[in-house]
Amino acid sequence: MRTLIILFMLTIPFSMVNIGCQDIEIGYLITEYAGYSLDSLVINYELDATPPEEVSNPEYQMYLDMGFSPEEIAMFFQIYPTMLVGGGEDWLRVTYGMPWTSTPIEGIEGSNPIWCQVKSITSEGGDADKLAACISVRGNGVLSVPVENDVPRGRYSISLNFWNEGRSKDVNNCFTIIVR
């Protein structure tokens, strides 16, 4: 009887260990509620990069007339003798090479890190292959198109694929790029 009790006591811990060890799937990924708050981006095909004019700043002159020195005006008010006026809509973008970018996608939940890639691009009146060659996407779903590109006019619908360790899910037709 004593041997039976000892044998019983030795088998209980091993059976408990086996019960606790199961195949546990790593990570989770939820994309059911994924979407962009601003779900489209308009890109100008012909950029207006007309430089602005530099004109004297009347506010700066007002502070000079009040008795402030030029150093005090710059330090306290961040006002300078001249300012830029006018200029084309895309002047800053062209001058500094700022890409066209979207907002981050919302509603993606999962185990970090989460990666993202463009799954597919469909086009109405454009060339999806040219957009696919220059578009990039970050892990948070921010799409970026360089300011210098050869994407023709058209309407492009973009589908994304999100993945992490053990999971992969698609978000279809979630963003639209309009080249006008």
Image: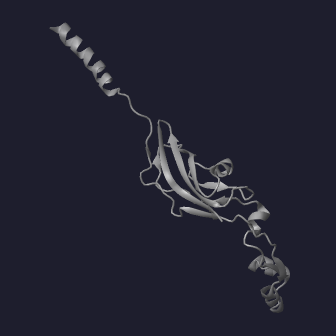
The quarter holding residue 51 reads: bottom right
If the image is split into quadrants, where does the C terminus sit? bottom right
- Seen in the image, is 22 located left or right of residue 134? left
Tell me residue 22's x, y (percent): 35, 27
Disc tally is 0
Q: Height in image: 168 above or below 47?
A: above
Q: Residue at x 39, y 32 (%)?
A: 24
Tell me residue 106's x, y (percent): 49, 56
Tell me residue 15's x, y (percent): 28, 20
Front in this rendered view, residue 21 or 141: 141
- Seen in the image, is 116 located left or right of residue 69? left
User: Seen from this angle, which residue lies furthest bottom?
Assistant: 65
Let me know if residue 30 appears in the view: yes
- Seen in the image, is 43 located left or right of residue 79? left
If the image is split into quadrants, where does the N terminus sit? top left
Q: Height in image: 95 above or below 20?
A: below
Tell me residue 137's x, y (percent): 61, 50
Front in this rendered view, residue 125 or 30: 125
Q: Residue at x 28, y 23 (%)?
A: 16
Let me know if residue 80 appears in the view: no
Image coloring type: one colour
Q: Height in image: 25 above or below 32?
A: above
Q: Height in image: 29 above or below 150?
A: above
